[in-house]
Image (tube, rainbow, N blue to C red):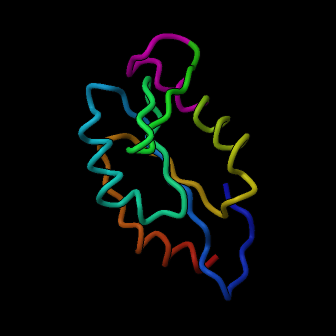
Amino acid sequence: TATTTSSSSAPKLFCAIYTYPKMRDLARAQALTWGYKCDGYLAFSTETIRELGMVHLLHRGEESYQNMWQKVRSIWAYIARHYLQDYDFFHLGGDDLYVMVENMRHFLGTY
């Protein structure tokens, strides 16, 4: 989801991941390697660790891979409720990805 940005300014990018306590080390690595390069960053989990930008977010059903849709649905609702007006573009992925924020920002700057 994106809003129109002025061509004279870089688009504001909010990045988020979904994770769970067992993968805390991956979430930490993401925050330290690429998450901080986004204009906004949060990791959604079943625990809150402010230093890592990790937020406990409830969702319907159990915490399992088979129920991922409910977790993702809750994440997008949270982002829309709290950040929709503050950013131009939003990116959400799992705790096992790496984002080249500079490349994404360059690509998004063409819109």
What residue is rendered at 56% in x and 63% in y? Answer: 13
For residue 60, above or below residue 37: above
> For this rendering, which residue is in front, 38 or 61?
38
Give how far across and how far down residue 103 sits, in percent.
Answer: 41, 74
> For this rendering, which residue is in front, 54 or 60?
54
Give how far across and how far down residue 81 sits, in percent.
Answer: 73, 40
What residue is rendered at 49% in x and 78% in y? Answer: 106
For residue 3, above or below residue 84: below
**75 left or right, relative to 7:** left
Residue extent of the magenta highlight = 61-73
What residue is rendered at 75% in x and 56% in y? Answer: 85
The magenta stretch spans residue 110 = no
**67 left or right, relative to 65:** right
Give how far across and how far down residue 88 sits, in percent.
Answer: 67, 64
| Screen quadrant of the N terminus | bottom right
For residue 19, above or below residue 3: above
What residue is rendered at 72% in x and 51% in y? Answer: 84
**Figure disc tally:** 0
Q: Main secondary structure of the magenta part?
A: helix
The magenta stretch spans residue 70 = yes
Q: Which residue reaches farthest top?
A: 61
Give how far across and how far down residue 32 sits, in percent.
Answer: 31, 56
